Image: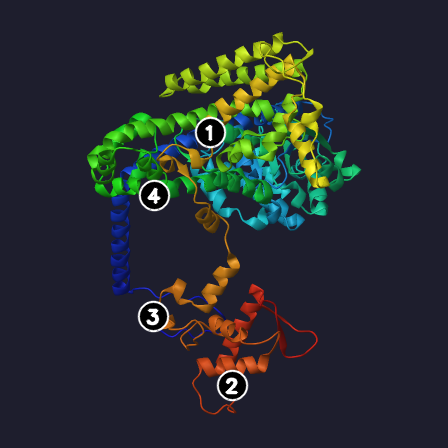
Amino acid sequence: MDSTISVSKGCFVFKGAAEGKKGGAIKRKLKDDNATNLQTQISKQPFYSTYTDTWRSLEIHIDQLQSQSYTKTLEDVVQYVENECIVGNTDTYDMEEIVPAAALLTGVNQPDHLEQFATLTQRILEKMSASVCMLQSRDCSTLKSAVETMVYNFIECAQERPPQSDLEDEDTEKRERKRLRRTQCNMRQLVHWYRRKYIKPYHNKDNEDDGVDDEEEHSPHAKQRTKRSHALVVILPDFECFNTTILQDLILILSAYYAHLPFVLIFGVATSVSAVHNALPYHVTSKVKLCVFKTQTAPVCLNEILERVILSPKYAFHLSGKAFKFLTHIFLYYDFSIHGFIQGYKYCLMEHFFQGNAYALCSNYTASLNQIKNLSHEDVECIRRLLSFRPYVESINDCKRIIAILTDDNYLKKKLPQLLRDCHIHFMLLRIFLEFLTVLTGDLPKCPLGKQRRELYSFCLSKELRDQPEFKECWQMLSFMSKDEFVSKVSKAISVTEDFLHSEIVDLELAEDCMTTVNEKLQALKDLLTKVVMSGMDEKSPTNSTAAPSTPATPEANKQKFTSRQDLKEHLLQMSKQHNKPSSEYAQSVAQTLLYIQNEIIIKYMAPLTRSPPLHELFVYSDVSTVRRHIIGAPRAALHMALNNPHYYLQCKCCQLSESNQLLATLPDLSVAYKLHLECGRMINLFDWLQAFRSVVDDIDNEQEQVDPQIQARFTRAVAELQFLGYIKMSKRKTDHATRLTW
């Protein structure tokens, strides 16, 4: 190789290595061919096609829902910008230096802000003639950099568009683009670019006779003499992250140039409007005409996606209660990111289908029937290994049928349509009655079962609902309600359920069977509710009126001898349980109604996964540990593995260890220093550490020999890297010592 001797530091390029290029090209081609073959093999599998179709439908549905939720607010912001441009487009000489601004409240801790502002930018460009600059706080460390970034973005975005034929041609555009540098981007350059590109003078003769030179026209205090037809929109997506001094100076500069440049500011405020007033003093806010807009909060957007997409009966894929709760907890307690939740849900979907072709049956009923004929012997065995398959086999009383199901693949395939149908109907009925129970218990005091459908859904799939104290508390509250409140609540639950049937279920497969079952239950519930309405409030004995009166107890019968207070207490408790307290007809009818709801709706159709139909694992993903391991990272464990055993990640032969505590000279310097520091206590002597490092990487016999400067430099770099990773820090109490921070 040629020498690379140079006085200064530099980057040297060597050309003409034809053999190396050819070999690299061959390796890349082989790698691409292998990747293409693997991709082709996977894409031909039934589970992959079902996965892609399911995710495509879910993604389209989610995108439509998000666009609908953002449309109203974004349209209002665009309308405000357009109106302000029309108002500011006047011919007056006395133009006020007040910049129109819109504060868009986007919600706290929501990482999806940039996507919202990207959509807003697209809407502005579609609706009106404007240039949009997205100015983030990371690009505005100083006022100079903020102005340069803003001007550069405005001019660059305009140059990416096709040039206007009446103003300039394409060659001129290219030449000016090459001449433009970041250091040349100032407000004077922006005024010159805007006047030349977008402003048309009212009267050319008047402009020629005015005698106003170029310096006066471009000064910030020059009077507006031309009509402006193009707005300059500056978006600050992270308003709270800006340096307040830089932000104030930038707004004052934009206000000073507002007579020449029609600026419109859009602030992305994550907290509240008070953040704007706290960051901007009066002399700055007096230069801004502020209008506040508010978007839906992240939890509201999540609830819409969950209720209308994730929990929709249109899709056969479902999450178990624990997996569903895990994803929602990540959203609510960590990041408030809708995008993060969707990606986590996509990962669960991918893990579910990639378990094998048997999971291709997780689709609509017709498609799953078509997939049955394509199942191989391995796929059928996968179905037999499902946990719910054993109880199904044990429930069969005929030995011949049991043997046929366990050994004959064709016989099991004939049984699959009915089993799949039962699963589809079960989850559809669960979703239908989830509407009923949410209305019934969602607004009770303290909301024992939760306010949202997502809370009740995870509760139902995880536990037996009737055995939970929260359920008993809800039932007790419902029984204590007045007649009007109880009748109104149950009637509303029935009405909401019927509306859900006609809006979401009627067009689906197997809808007739579901609607028949639901209508029977609702009709019986209406009859019971009629009895509640017609019942009186007078107290009466709950015993049957036709029954013979009970014989009064004789004094001799009540005479019993009790040897202790405990016996007397138990006897009195037993008598209190046997005593039938008089109750009203209304209380009895309410108890019958609640008992019917509990036995005929909740116990039957809102059962946990342990009581779900056979083969429900084909439709439900419940592996929470895998999701947690891949979504929530463990950086400390990963760093320890990488530094303690680099072969785990590098897969190189020189780093292969026979034991975990083994030290090799071929290990990376950082790994050697890390493994040596694990052998030390809280305080590490740097000289001893260096000698140990030297003994590993440099095989020498004389320890008194001076340390090679190259080895010392390698050690110093490794120590700095460990300090950067947070494993050590330099000690202030003892010189030439480092403090170990991890144990």
Q: Measure the C-alpha gap from mark 4 to mark 2.
A: 56 Å
- Of residue 58 and residue 104, the one placed in the foreground of this image is 58
Image depth: mark 2 or mark 3 in front: 3
Residue type, numbered disc 4: Phe
* Residue receiving disc 1: 309
First in sequence: mark 2 vs mark 1: 1
Q: How is the image coloured?
A: rainbow
Q: Are marks 2 and 3 in contact (CB under 8 Å)?
A: no
* Residue receiving disc 4: 354
- Of residue 475 and residue 110, the one placed in the foreground of this image is 475
Give the percent coordinates (x, y) of residue 389: 33, 38
* Residue receiving disc 2: 707
Task: Give the number of the disc on residue 653.
Answer: 3
Q: Going 67% across and 39% down the picture, which residue do you hit? A: 215
Q: Measure the C-alpha gap from mark 2 to mark 1.
A: 66 Å
Q: Vertical placement of 584 versus 466: above or below?
A: above
Give the percent coordinates (x, y) of residue 353: 35, 40
